[in-house]
Image (tube, rainbow, N blue to C red):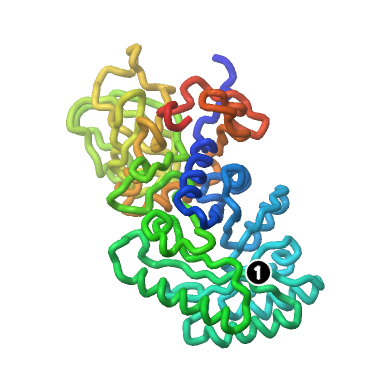
Amino acid sequence: MGRVTFPERSVEIDLDALRHNVGHLRDIAHPARVMAVVKADAYGHGAVPVARAALEAGAAWLGVAHISEGVELRRAGIEAPILSWLHTPHSDFVAGVENGLDLGISGWELDHVVAAARELERPAIVHLKIDTGLGRNGCPAEKWDELLSRAVGYQDEGVIRVVGVFSHLAVADEPTRPETDRQLELFREAVAAAENAGIDVEIRHLANTPATFSRPDCHFDLVRVGLGIYGLSPFADQGSADLGLKPVMTFSTVISTCKEVPKGQGVSYGHAYRTQEATTLGLIPVGYGDGVPRIATGAPVLVGERIYPVVGRIAMDQLVIDLGTPGLVDSSESPLGKRAVLFGGGRAPAVEDWAAAAQTINYEIVTRISGRVERVHLHVDGADDAGNDTAGIGSPSGASAPDDAGAGDDELA
């Protein structure tokens, strides 16, 4: 009964797959450059290792929502340009300017950024954001000229330098909708107004992942790609493979208990599910405390070569699968201790399968995996060539992965 040397529950992050995705998106966007969006701990994948891998693969910029996320990257020694765009009156603008972050400005933030720049006696680098129709962050179109005037005044004073103008698309994941055309038109007008006001706009950026694939007219100087670098599709009618992407995250654990039950056995809270025949149930030791959506009854789990459904209500720490065959517990086919993969690449269920079961989107499934699930980063130092990996599982020291680490080793470790 040797000591366990691999995680009981983990998400494996294939950084070579991420490098592939960044390179693929870079090729699509060329000559525009790529901003790899690593907000929310890189969509749950681990901000620092993902940021490093993305830069190695040719990303020119990093994007985060909060200043604190950018500061974390700087403290890890990352020197690439970083844009932070979501602030509150309590944001640490001094830390943002001090750490050389580019700061997104929608209006009210400008005075806070200027105050920080004056305190530090160094100019702040800013990108002005216009709301072209999303209705969230960004300067309203009717106040754009006023913001430009204030920004030019501060720039003439030497406390800020305006390098960019940007906006965000609302419906680019539905390429046939006309709203994107209108947003593009308004964005072009906003850039022209900025230039007419005397701003040298070095960086124009509008496209997100779906627009990077479907709207080359939105590429401009820089595309901001989040979901795509993680190997997931933003389109309802196209999967990762259709877009040339490789899923990066694999979520797995091991079966912790299996038991024989008779026909009619109620399963989990409320007995919302009862077995149709005598069968074997497998207990999977992850639940909504680990970020598994409580609503995702019916979602698929891969054990060995077969997919089994989640049955009954998902609890905080555990869920149940129906293995469909009685008599497994004391046989050589006992599933106890076998690897159970919720989603990933290769033969594993897709993230989209879990999103469908949870009535949500793939973004949420990967981002919500909780901190008590260990992140295991594969290929931290990349690969010299196909089949010659220079790092394996775990920390940057690169310990070896277990033999069965991959649900589909040809695609995703």
Q: Classify residue 100 as left or right of residue 119.
A: left
Q: Residue at x 68, y 69 (%)?
A: 125
Q: Which residue is mark 1?
A: 91
* Percent of width and height locating residue 111: 67, 80
Q: Classify residue 149 as left or right of residue 16.
A: right
Q: Classify residue 388 as left or right of residue 160.
A: left
Q: What SS does tag 1 mark?
A: loop
- Which amino acid does the dot numbered 1 rest on? Ser
Number of disc labels: 1
In this orientation, does residue 282 appear?
yes
Image-quadrant location for residue 280: top left
* Percent of width and height locating residue 70: 65, 57
* Percent of width and height locating residue 399: 62, 26
Q: Residue at x 40, y 26 (%)?
A: 257
As drawn, the residue found furthest toward the top would be 332
Q: Quadrant of the N terminus?
A: top right
Asked whether 119 or 294 is in front, the reply is: 119
The vertical placement of 157 against 231, above or below, is: below
* Percent of width and height locating residue 296: 33, 46
Asked whether 128 or 395 is in front, the reply is: 128
The vertical placement of 303 against 51, above or below, is: above
Q: Residue at x 55, y 86 (%)?
A: 145
As drawn, the residue found furthest toward the front would be 31
Asked whether 123 or 255 is in front, the reply is: 123
Q: Residue at x 75, y 73 (%)?
A: 117
- Mark 1 surroundings: few (<14), some (14-19) or many (≥20) residues within 10 A: some
